[in-house]
Amino acid sequence: AFAWLLLGGSLLAGIQASKRMFGRGDDSDRMKDRSVKRWSSREEARDRRRQEILQRQRQDRRNYREHIRRLAETTTEKEDESQDLFGSGGASKRAKRDSNPGIGMDVKEVGMKKKARGKKQKPPKMETEKDPEAEAKKREKRQEYLRRRREWFARQLMYPEWMTGIPRDLGSNWFVLPRPEGIRCLVISSRGKTISRKKSGSILHNFQSALPNGNRHQMKQDPCILDCIYQPQKQIYYVLDLMCWGGYAIYDSATDFRHFWVHSKLSEVPIHRVNSENKFKFAPVPRFSADTAGLRKAYGGGGASAHGFQMDGLLFVHKQTHYDFGLSPLCLVWKDAKTSRFFVDTSDGKTVPPKQKCTLYSQPDGKVMSLEGQVVGTLTPQAVAQAKIKLDCLHKFTVSGVSISQNGKEVVEGLSYGGPGSKARVLPDSWSKIVFQSLARRGATPSIMEIAKRCAAASAINTGTEKDAPAASKSQPTHSINEAKTKTIEMSDAM
């Protein structure tokens, strides 16, 4: 018996050694477990980041009155350097005019006062030759100021991250909006005119509108600030969000309240017809809860038939988020081939380039960064000297794709320099966009069916939590899961 025990132990040790040698047995299971853990850890990190931002928004209460005043004073086509946008402490032109009554007076009135005092007017100054170096420095300073100004305006919008992973609470705590195709812009009505600015910070339109303080007949009213998408084909501004109406700032209000104001306030003003006091139409974007029914209505089969405008994907917004400046993980954009002509990033919506392109920011030390501040790569001193690359600005790059490293992090492959960035842009691409576009080229982005399943499961869990009692029956969770499966089947039939 002892001999048989020794023989069995040796055979077992030999089998385990052969498994370790040839990589069979439990190793493949371990690798699968590791990949699942890495994927789940990334999802948990995203959810944890969203919860941290929500907590910070609840604790952080800003005073937006001064911010609205700054935006309201910029409704002019002239890019005036005296406007203090960056908090540098310099007085604005309006403050100077208020402190000096002589500024802003009529020219004839000033001349009459001078003659009454018996003072002689100074002769005109003789034109002198201008120093080329001084003029070049002046132009460079002017261009740098305009770039900073446009970047300041560009950062007044809330930019969505791209949906590379589906939030676990999507069906219970999020709204979904059909995203119109067009030009994203910030609309400000103040001083009897309305100015719309593109994502680059440059002016798109200067016009008269029926918004509060948006035309010359409403100058006594307070300003208005909207987040819109302009469609040139229909010449309509589609309103995504509202941050200020009649001087009342609602930046720090929840999404539900802001969207309620979008629909209620726009219905109070004659903004739906074109006339001399309202050059462009304004229309609110429809909003739905991100459950299976709302997702079906927002998706609508893609295209332009469902909502009356050409779609460019779906926009998911958390119900409790504030309107935050810059990139926000509580606002997500998703696209597929049915809902967007630019599912894979192209210039014309038709021809797909052979390599994925992106725009990134190069730091003075050569590090290449995305909009989130994530380091994507590094420009070596040899490459900077050889290609005569100007640092501390935007540049174009091409990448082969995005892969997962051994420690579970996403890294780019084949990053190569593609030239200086466009002067029309002031912000780099986000890291989530680079990842989404890499997945889109491989056909690995979250599908509408996967999103529908997650929405159905989340809404079923939420419904089950609300109906749960201490004496709940054991068959109730099975009923919720079956209900979620039924909703998903209905979703697939509708699409």
Image (tube, helix red, strand yellow):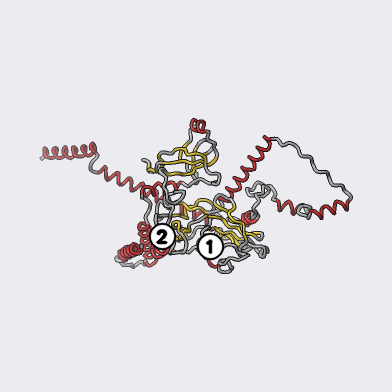
Left or right of residue 486: residue 182? right
Quick one: label 2 or label 1, which is nearer the N terminus? 1
Judged from the image, the secondary structure of the residue bearing numbered disc 1 is: helix
For the C terminus, give its image quadrant: bottom left
Depth check, front residue: 468 or 325? 325
Q: Name the residue under label 2.
A: 302
Q: Of circles 2 and 1, which is in front?
A: 2
Residue drawn 47% across the image and 39% down it: 418
Residue at image point 45% right, 58% down: 311
Amino acid on which the number 2 mark rests in the picture = Gly
> Callout 1: few (<14), some (14-19), or many (20+) C-alpha neighbours within 10 Å?
many
Q: Can residue 88 be seen in this view?
A: yes
Q: Where is residue 206 in the image (x, y as percent from the top left)?
A: 62, 57
**Residue with the mark numbered 1:** 258
Coordinates of residue 382 in the picture (x, y in percent): 49, 30
Name which quarter of the figure residue 63 lies in: bottom right
Q: In terms of image quadrants, where is residue 188?
A: bottom right
Residue 403 against residue 286 in the figure, above or below: above
Q: What residue type is labelled 1?
A: Arg
